[in-house]
Amino acid sequence: MAGSLDPELRSALAARLRYYHELGIYDFYQRERVATDESSSLTFQPEIREEMAARKSAVVATVAEDNILEIVAPKPEYGVADPVAALKLIREDLGDCTRCKLHKQGRKQIVFGVGNPRAELMFVGEGPGADEDAQGEPFVGRAGQLLNNMIKAMGLRREDVYIANVVKCRPPGNRTPEPDECETCSPFLMRQIAAIKPKVVVALGATAARNLLAMNSSLGDLRGRFYDFKPAGSDSGWSGARLAVTYHPAYLLRDPRQKGEAWKDLQMVMKYLGIEPPRKAAE
């Protein structure tokens, strides 16, 4: 078996790995499958499958020998135990981001995230609005004030939790972030979650829920239960978080009738974290 890959193939593989790495994808899995002869639609005989498997293993071995993964540089916060330092490194890596079209569509500044770097509870929205874009902090407008009240009703302070968004630049007209924008920006959110290592992540609204869970279900279908959640590439010593889904505060402003349902979602989170609500909120 050859000891090295063709330079062009090696370059193409490295480029593909960098692409997946930027998307926050670090682990790859291959399903077992039975190859078929397209002309006859008959399953290959066992001895042919064994030969194909041997060839596939040899190719994998060749890639390993070339240490192709070493071409992809690790993220700067890897190995940093202090979440404050890790978040600082992630922010520096984000820089004055121009990775997607939002940087040239009227944003004033990047809205990275705010709160306790060691928080047990993290809230994730979809993207900053006009007030957030002006102040550089997530959830500071009317929806942010409602989120503050929701957090207070749980018996917590805004300073106790961490708050971030899927995208860190304001979409023009406060529109919903587009799929390519989410795909470009969400790896930084995943790195924030991996650095903070919260016990629970609450996805606020359908956009946040679908991007975090990689599911295209409706908000109604996603609510009411916990999901096991751990960003790819996270510290192996961290078992991951539980993820819950509830309504975005902006939606609750438009339809206050759903506040009771949102409170049920938060009560589920509180029970898991062992949080007793203030007496007034409980009543």
Image (tube, rainbow, N blue to C red):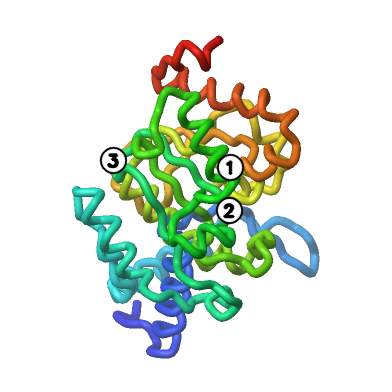
Q: Can the viewer see residue 208?
A: yes
* Helix, strand or loop for disc 3: loop
The amino acid sitting under disc 3 is Arg
| 2 and 1 marks in contact (CB < 8 Å) | yes
**Residue, disc 3:** 118
CA distance separating discs 2 and 1: 7 Å
Residue 209, position in %: x, y? Answer: 60, 45
Q: Is residue 67 above or below residue 7?
A: above
Q: Which class describes the residues within 10 Å of circle 1: few (<14), some (14-19), or many (20+)? A: many
* Helix, strand or loop for disc 1: strand
Q: Can you tell which quarter of the image residue 92 is in?
A: bottom left
Q: Answer with left or right where residue 63 lies relative to residue 210.
A: left
Residue 210, position in %: x, y? Answer: 62, 48
N-terminal-most mark, 1 or 3: 3
Residue 215, position in %: x, y? Answer: 64, 47
Q: Is residue 262 above or below residue 197?
A: above
CA distance separating discs 3 and 2: 22 Å
Front position in the image: 262 or 99: 262
**Residue, disc 1:** 204
Residue found at x 49% / y 64%: 134
Residue 121, position in %: x, y? Answer: 41, 35
Front position in the image: 78 or 275: 275
Front position in the image: 168 or 225: 168
